[in-house]
Amino acid sequence: MNDTDIWTEKYRPSKFEDLVGQQEIIKRVRSLVQSLNIPHLLFAGPAGIGKSTLALIIVKTLFQETWRENYLELNASDERGIDVVRQKVKDFARTKSIGSVPFKVIFLDEADALTKEAQQALRRTMENYSNTCRFILSCNYSSRIIDPIQSRCVTFRFRLLEKKDITKVMEKIAQAEKLSLIPEVFETLYETSEGDCRRAINLLQATASISPNINSEMINMIASSTKPADVKIILDYALSGDFVNSRNKLLDVMLKESISGTDIIKAIQKEIWNLQIEPEIKVKLTEKTGEAEFRMIEGSDEFVQLQALLASFVLAGMGKST
Amino acid sequence: MSWQEWENQHKMITNESHESFAEKYRASNFSQIVGQNLAVSSIKSFLKDFPKKKALILYGPAGTGKTSLVLAAAKENKYELLELNSSDLRNRAQLEERLKPATEQSSLFHSSKILLMDEVDGVTGTDIGGIPELVKLINSTKFPIIMTCNDVWQSKLSPVRAKSTLVELKPLSISTISRLLQEIAKKEGLNESPYFLNQIAIKSQGDMRAALNDLQSYSSSEELIVDLTETRDIQQSIFNILKKLFKERSDFLNLFDSTNLSLDEILLWIEENAPKEYKSLALAKAFEALGNADRFRGRIYKNQSWRFLIYQNAFQSAGISYSKYAPLQTSFTKYERPSRILKIWLNNQKFLKKKSIAKKYARFTHCSTKRALSEFPLIKPILKNQNVQKSLKLSEEEIDFLNK
């Protein structure tokens, strides 16, 4: 157990036995590690189901105390350019490992965020340095990883965690942190986190920072108050013809909560399909939304474009869609 | 300087016989001031109520009678007039040297005095400390200070604005100017047709001084055709432009030519003020038009295709004006300066802190900064824990941001 007050780290499993779910994968990976020789690995699956954790367990088991020296973790969604592959990855890969294991490990998280060019560059690097370095790639969708890389890796497809898995983790934390949880809370945590264990733990900790006695209502309250952008309210105002309130709420969300225009437009695009309007209008509004997003990429002002998009919603609500 | 001296000084500049009409027929008492009844009564009550308010700003376009009004006020009340205009250097030292004694010592021969700061919008960058000194003078003065300017809404004047009564002088109506021209033509023995005088009045666009200058120049030449196509270019304030744009219904393709604000700045003004004028459908349509204007603005910057300015202009002018089905009958609307840019800047500063925190958190917990940012509201209560702050090595500013 790690010495920190961030629960996602404090309770991150550090041994194969502690992992929940993915039992098949764990069994296979474990035997690879025991043979002290692993191929390049590709972990595919949604967020918060143990991909990074498994990678960490692999290196800790392999290298024991020297794992920090022999391990490089890069997050491709933050550093997605070709330069990262050419510099950081190569620099690390070409030096010899420290200790008894003959190779080092590079964990490339969210590798599907790498540009195609960076992936191409990675492909040669993986081959050239395969003697001294093994890669573990993680991604949400393996289809976004180019074929040559997929063919160099053993792919493991992670499944969503089930309710019993999340419950097991939550119970363990509750016990250690002396929280009192009534059984229905586990259900709520599982549902609001949608099987994302990182989110479930964060949700639990955020709620526990208010009170150690946790019920479902509190979880729901925290979950809804911390939604990144409440675009539904914005769109409801617009559809009912109240442009002024819709606009004010939009500016509020953007300015007070620092949410970028592109994030809002993504949320709007998703929300359209949940609105109580005619399907034809949904299609029409999707077109408007796409157009607004395109204009923003083209260099238009995100505030003006979002307000113009709301205007389209107002017009659609009045049956005056253009 | 008394008003007589003031008048003499002005007369000296122009030879008596060839005096310009504009100076010769300058109004010299309240009864001669035409078409500014509201301004006359506000200046009267300002002087009567002094020192309730210590300063007054007369603002309005050129040739509406700002300086004449002050001159008349001094004459009627037998006040001494001390004038400082833009031909004088008006930096801190100058103001202190010339005006400060005047604001403290009473007048020898007159019951009181008026300090006239003519053309305060001409206090420029070289007049260092001019405006702050002016504010100090207003605070300490024993005599009324009157200022004149064309554009009172310039940001540099805001400290002075807060301390002063604002009195607007509107451009004179064409019929008023036409009537005055007829009186003057008669006195001068000019035999001009009413039609001709009316043409001059139309061309002046409410600027009496310009009308008088035109009368003088035309009457001394043989050519008696007034060329209306060369109307005087006058600078309109953004407030007037917005008023026309929102209240009237016309294509207005040339509306923005009369301001020196850029189209991009005007776009922000429209964005800020459209909701004050338009409601529901018209407002939605206006924002659609604004979105289209902005689309071309983006393309201009992206491709450097300056030709697209035509489209931006069309959507911003005609697009906005035609958003409504009929001209608006609403009365006065108080337009506000665009505030969004400042808000965005403040917000960006905040966002940078948020991002640097998210980055530290992400590295510590093996996830991406992007994910940490998208889950920030959920993470925030966790980050308030002091031990967590310590282990993430958050800076003091970052901790301040979290505690706010």
Image (spheres, rainbow, N blue to C red):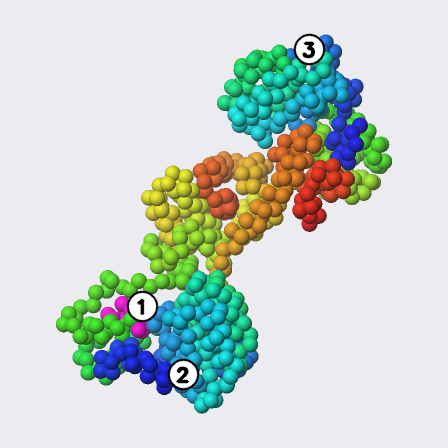
Residue matched to label 1: B205
Observer-side mark, 1 or 2, equals 2
The label on residue B290 is none
Identify the amino acid type marked 3: Asn
Distance from Cα at disc 3 to Cα at disc 1: 89 Å
Classify mark 2: residues with Cα within 10 Å, few (<14), some (14-19) or many (20+): few
Judged left or right of residue A103, residue B94 is left
Judged left or right of residue A168, residue B284 is left
Q: Residue at x 61, y 21 (%)?
A: A92
Say yes or no: labels 2 and 3 on the same chain.
no
Q: Residue at x 61, y 28 (%)?
A: A75
Q: Position of residue A55 (x, y in %)?
A: 69, 21
Comparing A57 with B282, the one in front is A57
Identify the amino acid type marked 1: Gln
Task: Name the magenta segment's main secondary structure.
Answer: helix
Classify mark 3: residues with Cα within 10 Å, few (<14), some (14-19) or many (20+): some
Classify mark 1: residues with Cα within 10 Å, few (<14), some (14-19) or many (20+): many
Residue matched to label 3: A37
Q: Which residues are magenta?
A: B196-209
Residue matched to label 2: B1
Say yes or no: labels 3 and 1 on the same chain.
no
- Is residue A266 within the magenta segment? no
Q: Position of residue A176 (x, y in %)?
A: 84, 32
In which chain is the residue bearing label 2?
Answer: B
